[in-house]
Structure formats: structure tokens, C-alpha cells
Amino acid sequence: MIRRDATLPVTTTCRLLDVSRSTAYYKAASKAPDPEELALKRLMDALHMKYPFMGTRSLRDQLRRRGYKINRKRVKRLMAEMGIASVAPQPNTSRPGNNHKIYPYLLRGLRIDRPNQVWATDITYIPMARGFLYLVAIMDWYSRRVLSWRLSISMDSTFCLEALSEAVQTYGTPEIFNTDQGSQFTGEEFTGALKASNIRISMDGKGRWMDNVFIERLWRSLKYEEVYLKAYETVPEARAGIKEWIRFYNHERTHQSLGRQTPEQVYFNQSTKELAA
């Protein structure tokens, strides 16, 4: 627990405890999460991973087929809480929300042929046994390597900025940084950090999940191979499990599209013989 009257700054305390600052600022609800609603969210998350094109009506129908008495209004509320949305085009998608500037998509037709040419990021919902978290990851597009990640119990931009800061401090800067149009990435704090490092900003079109397909595939693999199998009880348990899976993904998992090499090999241009040595 972080005491509000502690002498150490919150930033320092969070760094020592290895938690996101957004976790420290979050005020938990007075009552425990409803188990039935958590199970419902877990199912909705799995359905969204399998059928990302489904909107509120289709998800409602799928849930009703599985025995849930639920209306579209509740499905819409839960989707908003989880940060998920149909990838199908929506009306008035050209209008940016919250007066945030929307940047053009720069990757169409671009040949990506080297590490640190393009980085991409996204946020996903992580269900737990008694609660949920949000996970952000930053990936090098060319090698598919996960460069940094952060967990949070809220959807503010703090944990996204922390992941960006770690990636830049550890690996330098990319030429282009691609995001979706979520408020965490369109806000002045995040775009300002990119511009301060002379990084060109690219944003997916609404309903264009294929624009960030490599991270979408990462989420699917992570959830089916790790998250859905574990039902984490605590945040440290979730962090440890996800950390080990990402280590496996970066260092051991080979990809057909990478010539049966791992993201680690491709990012650092290492041969199998070099790694063995």
C-alpha cells in the first residue's frame, strides 16, 4: 500500500515497488467486483478476440445464445469499460473525439525493412479471477519484438507514457510511431513526447484493425497461450506471468514470416550460431 503522507514522492515509490503511477492514483471501488460481471467480461473479451468485427448487437446475440440475459445497452457499457470496439467502420469516423488532433496513416505502401524504422503500440484488456487490468505494449514493426510494456488498473495515459519512456531510453527512437485513435495516444502528452523526440506520428483509420495487425496477433497469442489459462489472482501474479510470456515470445518463439527466427534475432540481427555462442 502507498501511504499518501509518505515522505517519498509517489513517482519514486512506484518505481521502487515496480507499479504504474496510475495504480497509485487509482481509488478502488468500495465493493468487490461482481463475479458474474467479471465472467461476462471474460467471455466478451474472448468473443472479441475471435470475432473483432462484432458490434454491440452481434455480441449481445452471442451472449444470449450462451445463456446470458443481456440487452444491448449493457453490452455497450461493458465494451466501453473494457476499451474494446468493433473494427467495422462506424458513422462519422472522420471526426476526432475530445478535440484531439488525428494524424494521418503513414505506413500505406511503405517498405519496412529495418529495426527502429516503425514502432507501434496498443492497449488490451486483461481479465483476472477477481478484477481486470489494462496492458499496453510497444512493438518494433520490422522484427515484431516487444520493446516495453506496462500494466495498469485504469485507462489513463500515464502507463502508456511510462512504456514509451522506457522504450526510448532503452532502444533509442524510431522514425515513425503508429497508434490507433484512442484518447491515450491522441492526447497532447503522448503526441508531445513523440514530437519532442522528432518521431513522426502515424495513426490507424477508425475500424482499420489491419493497420496494426501485428499487435492484434500479439494480443491473441498472449491471451490464448497465457492469460485465459491462468486467471490471475493478483497484480504481481499477472505481471510475472505476462513478463515470462513476453520473454518467451521475444527470445524463443519463432515466426514463419521472420524466416523461422525469433523477434530477438531479427531485431539485433543475430544468427542462430551467434545466440548459441
Image (cartoon, grey):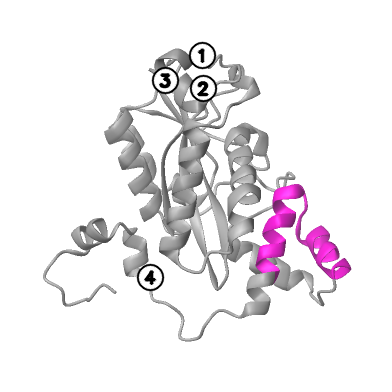
Q: Which residue is mark 3?
A: 275
The reply to whether dot 2 and dot 1 touch (C-beta < 8 Å) is yes
**Three-letter amino acid code at disc 1?**
Asp
Question: Which residue is found at the position 56% from the left and 32% from the top?
Answer: 253
**Three-letter amino acid code at disc 4?**
Tyr
| Quadrant of image for the N terminus | bottom left
> The magenta stretch spans which residues?
40-66
Question: Which residue is found at the position 32% from the left and 29% from the top?
Answer: 171
Task: Looking at the picture, tell me which residue is in the foreground, 78 or 233.
Answer: 233
For the residue carrying disc 1, how many other residues have a C-alpha within 10 Å: few (<14), some (14-19), or many (20+)?
Answer: few
Q: Is residue 219 left or right of residue 23?
A: right
**Three-letter amino acid code at disc 3?**
Leu
Task: Looking at the picture, tell me which residue is in the foreground, 183 or 128.
Answer: 128
Farthest residue, direction right? 65
Is-magenta flag for residue 185? no
> In the picture shown, does residue 240 fall above or below 122?
below
Label 4 or label 3, whichever lies nearer to me, is 3
Query: Along the polypeptide, which appears first: circle 1 or circle 4?
Result: 4
Q: Which residue is mark 2?
A: 142
Question: Which residue is found at the position 68% from the left and 42% from the top?
Answer: 207
Task: Looking at the picture, tell me which residue is in the foreground, 211 or 192.
Answer: 211
> In the picture shown, does residue 13 fall above or below 107?
below
Q: Which mark is residue 26?
A: 4
